Amino acid sequence: MSDEFQGRYSRRIEEIQPFHVMQLQAQARALETAGKDIVHMEIGEPDFPTPEPVTRAAIRAIEKGDMHYTPALGLPLLRERIAAFYQQRYGLSVSAQRIVITPGASGALLLALGLLLDTGQQIMLADPGYPCNRNFVRFLGGVPQMINVDASSGYQLTAALVEQHWNVATRALMLASPSNPTGSLINEQELAGIGQIVARKNGHLIVDEIYHGLVYDGEPATALSFGEQIIVINSFSKYFGMTGWRLGWLVAPENAIRNIEKLSQNLFLAAPTPAQYAALAAFEHDNLAILEQRRQQFQQRRDYLLGALRRLGFELPLTPQGAFYLYANCEKFSNDSFSFAQTLLHEAGVAVTPGRDFGENQPQKFLRFSYTTSLARLEEGVSRLQAYLS
Ligand SMILES: Cc1ncc(COP(=O)(O)O)c(C=O)c1O
């Protein structure tokens, strides 16, 4: 039946790009099934399990059995906990009324773009960047306005770049700090400058802070401290170790909440109830202590892998301050990072993500290494790379 299907699918769906790394991951799994050992440095989620205080809270809630829909904006108590977290971590007072609980940062990004974007309008994004953003923009009938960034701008957009590229069709600018795939943090002065330009243009600024808990150099301020009109996205996925629970949040200006609520009611009804009850335990002292230990382990891994890759000849001119990624120039070894990633998988037993997934800004020169595996496995991966490359 499916072979004979002659109907058409939407033009929109044709424009959505797949994650190329998934193909590579499938090959890695197939090699493992055939008995080969693979060091995974392609995976974009923490290797640690969800901390016990959170899973225990979920089990207690499920046993109570009240698993009805929550309000579309989220459990009021969880919104208050998140507000308290901004006070505790950043010394910033944020009203719980401005916080919306979403199915992952993915749900938050969709709500933010749904709120702002009209057909044909542009959303400015850094290239390289997180691939779903430009696909979301296209899916909503908008146009991703990709701006190349490199080491000279700290792999982030700058106020000068934003000023230079803003045009009449630009509706909003989206940043991620720290960024995926580069791990770079936006400089606070630049962020303040960008906020001012966007406000002057009557545009909007969305800042994705999903990796904010995983910063190893300094304690960055949240973009929320640079203006009440800025929309901030965050999630329980990465720092809190809860990828599969599908829970995130959005902080928006108070006057946008009614519209976001409408959209959330229609798209999701609500975020998952068990996950919301589980997340109530995420801000408890014992859980935060576990997360701090993990953050320190990520930092050790970053320090090790950064030095090791540089010694092998990969070019990493800057020290990425956060997330769990190193975006390395591999020109010394290959001018086609896609086939190089295939070769490393098959010849060296090391899986990495080729630049192609992150945009069109010279992706053939870059590989993304994730340090989402133990230090011992990273060491094994590096020694395999060394043997192969020499
Ligand atoms: C920058 C960035 N934003 C958002 C997401 C989506 O995260 P989730 O929907 O799991 O919260 C990811 C996931 O990798 C990411 O890297």
Image (spheres, rainbow, N blue to C red):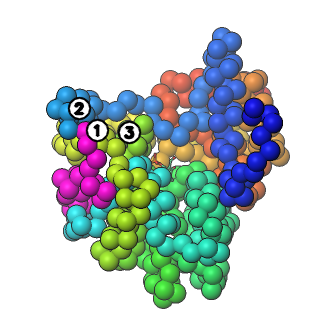
Q: Is residue 344 left or right of residue 194?
A: right
SS at mark 1? Answer: helix
Q: Is residue 42 left or right of residue 111?
A: right
Sequence-wise, the earlier of marks 3 and 1 is 3
User: Is residue 216 rendered magenta in the image?
Assistant: no
Residue matched to label 1: 274
Contact between marks 3 and 1 (CB within 8 A): the answer is: yes
The kind of residue on which mark 2 rests is Ile
Query: Which portion, as a residue range, is magenta?
Result: 67-87
Marking on residue 62: 2
* Picture layout, residue 237 above or below residue 217: above
SS at mark 2? Answer: helix
Q: Position of residue 67 (x, y in %)?
A: 25, 39
Residue at 34% over, 33% down: 50
Tell me the mark number nearer the camera, choosing from 3 and 2: 2
* Picture layout, residue 101 above or below residue 92: above
Q: Position of residue 310 (x, y in %)?
A: 64, 42
Contact between marks 3 and 2 (CB within 8 A): the answer is: no
The kind of residue on which mark 3 rests is Trp
Residue matched to label 3: 245
Contact between marks 2 and 1 (CB within 8 A): the answer is: yes
